[in-house]
């Protein structure tokens, strides 16, 4: 049931070394490719890094320009601590062996929105396949270096595109966390 998949999806930040299969990755990418997109323009693109060494490198680049000062006092999760909770972490990708980088056209009003629609399709499809995931931000900063720009060029990402989001993928190391209790007052129904 779709609702079971929605409720059993959690952001996972502890991964085993086991790589996901190419077959599963292709299915996850297909789900991303069929996400809703503003104006039907299909402006976003995905680059899937199915290589744990390169994913680790990108995860470190993702944290290189992370300014924790802006987030002082924030708390994300005790069960799955994030880079906000644990300043000792060296990678923003938590050791996940695969990462999908979602790029979208610059100067397009809905570039971030389009990217996150893709990200949501990805995490739900991954959950159905028993694959853990987490959406990760700081896309632009990650590729804002000579090394980052060279990778984008190598991957044929158009020059007027920027990374809006990542989804990391792999198998959970440890137990599934619980969902946080939902804050009341977030739903209003008007008949
Ligand atoms: C826009 C957005 C950006 C996020 N960026 C990060 C991130 O950079 N690092 C991280 O560990 N989690 C990130 N997350 C995951 C959230 O922390 C997570 O969804 C939230 O704590 C709720 O937990 P759940 O996904 O397990 O329900 C992001 C989620 C969203 C929607």
Image: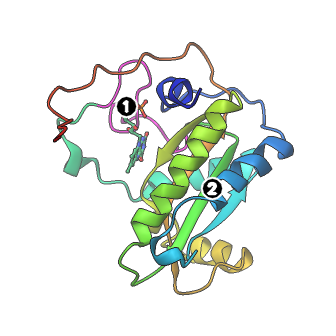
For marks 1 and 2, give the one nearer the viewer: 2
In the image, residue 92 lies in the stretch drawn in magenta:
yes
Note whether 65 is above or below 85 in the view shown: below
The answer to which image quadrant residue 20 occupies is top right
The residue tagged 2 is: 32
Span shown in magenta: 76-93
Whether residue 183 is visible, yes or no, is yes
Q: Position of residue 85 (x, y in %)?
A: 33, 31
Near mark 1 (Cα within 10 A), the count class, few <14, some 14-19 or many ≥20, is few
Quadrant of the image containing the N terminus: top right
- The residue lying toward the viewer, choosing from 108 and 95, is 108
Residue visible at 49% across and 62% down in the picture: 115
Quadrant of the image containing the C terminus: top left
Note whether 148 is above or below 171 in the view shown: below
Near mark 2 (Cα within 10 A), the count class, few <14, some 14-19 or many ≥20, is many
Mark 1, secondary structure of its residue? loop
The residue tagged 1 is: 86
- The residue lying toward the viewer, choosing from 3 and 72, is 3
Whether residue 51 is visible, yes or no, is no
């Amino acid at each position: 049931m779709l609702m079971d998949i929605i409720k059993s999806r959690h952001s996972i930040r502890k991964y085993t070394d086991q790589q996901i299969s190419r077959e599963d990755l292709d299915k996850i990418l297909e789900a991303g490719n069929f996400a809703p997109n503003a104006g039907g323009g299909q402006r976003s693109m995905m680059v899937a890094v199915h290589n744990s060494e390169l994913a680790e490198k990108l995860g470190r680049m993702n944290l290189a320009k992370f300014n924790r000062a802006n987030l002082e006092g924030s708390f994300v999760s005790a069960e799955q601590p994030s880079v906000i909770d644990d300043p000792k972490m060296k990678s923003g990708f938590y050791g996940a062996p695969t990462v999908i980088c979602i790029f979208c056209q610059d100067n397009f009003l809905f570039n971030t929105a389009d990217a996150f629609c893709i990200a949501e399709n990805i995490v739900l499809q991954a959950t159905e396949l028993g694959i853990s995931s987490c959406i990760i931000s700081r896309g632009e900063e990650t590729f804002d270096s000579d090394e980052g720009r060279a990778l984008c060029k190598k991957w044929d990402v158009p020059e007027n595109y920027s990374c809006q989001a990542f989804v990391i993928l792999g198998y959970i190391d440890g137990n599934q966390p619980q969902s946080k209790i939902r804050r009341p007052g977030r739903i209003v129904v008007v008949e």
